[in-house]
Image (spheres, grey):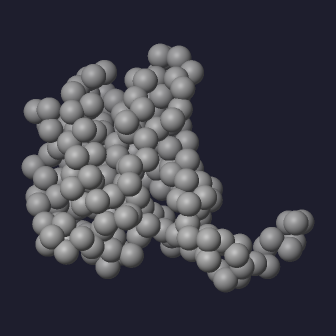
């Protein structure tokens, strides 16, 4: 297919009929930047209207309920998600009871100041939450390219995305490697749900 033909496609042609919501809480902007990088990566496969970042303070429940993939992200406070993100989790209890999100895809990311920062505990917490909803988990199948700030998956996380932010503005931290990994993750997530969308939608 040449470029001119591709540019004339309509949403009923080859554009995947799937969507992604990246739900996050961020006090200082660092976790928000990671969420936006994941969305940026997803936009390599999907139109902008089909991959959005959603702040827990301004939740579009209708968009979440129709989304095929929910990506959950939080900073790490005292070895757990933030209080605000936990409030969001608790607000989904009726959806848990009604099995509203059963069968959806789920993924997660965690950001902290320390190299470890107990990010694994947060990814496990969110994974358990997704399992309670009956969701299907997507991890981060990316081998580390090294352990320097510019490397991909430098923290060697496979359950989900781990990023580290230092004491600085979100424009500067997390570093380039973590942001590039977030973009890679978003692209991977989009490719995964496109691959597994119902056959009737694949044409």
Observer able to see residue 28: no
Q: Can I make out residue 101 in this image?
A: yes
Image x and y of residue 115, in percent: 31, 21
Residue 91: percent from left, percent from top: 13, 66
Q: Is residue 155 left or right of residue 3?
A: left
Q: How many marks?
A: 0
The vertical placement of 4 against 104, above or below, is below
Query: Residue sitting at 26 percent across and 32 percent down?
Result: 119
Q: Is residue 124 above or below residue 14?
A: above
Q: Which residue is located at x 55 percent, y 42 percent?
A: 184
Residue nearer the viewer, 194 or 153: 194
**The N terminus lies in quadrant:** bottom right
In the image, residue 196 above or below residue 58: above
Q: Position of residue 100 (x, y in %)?
A: 27, 73
Q: Position of residue 44 (x, y in %)?
A: 62, 56
User: Residue 160 falls in which quadrant of the image?
Assistant: top left
């Amino acid at each position: 297919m040449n470029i001119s033909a591709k540019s004339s496609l309509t949403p009923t042609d080859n554009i995947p009929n799937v969507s992604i919501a990246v739900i996050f809480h961020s006090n200082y902007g660092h976790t928000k930047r990671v969420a936006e990088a994941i969305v940026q990566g997803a936009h390599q496969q999907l139109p902008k209207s089909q991959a959005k970042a959603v702040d827990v303070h301004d939740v579009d429940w209708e968009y979440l309920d129709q989304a095929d993939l929910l990506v959950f992200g939080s900073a790490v406070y005292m070895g757990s998600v933030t209080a605000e993100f936990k409030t969001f989790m608790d607000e989904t209890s009726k959806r848990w009871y009604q099995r509203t999100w059963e069968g959806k895809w789920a993924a997660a990311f965690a950001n902290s100041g320390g190299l470890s920062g107990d990010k694994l505990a947060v990814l496990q917490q969110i994974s358990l939450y997704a399992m309670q909803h009956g969701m299907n988990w997507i991890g981060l199948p990316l081998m580390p390219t090294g352990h320097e700030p510019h490397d991909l998956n430098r923290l060697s996380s496979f359950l989900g995305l781990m990023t580290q932010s230092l004491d600085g503005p979100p424009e500067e931290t997390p570093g380039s490697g973590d942001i590039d990994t977030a973009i890679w993750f978003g692209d991977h997530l989009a490719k995964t749900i496109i691959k597994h969308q119902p056959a009737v939608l694949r044409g």
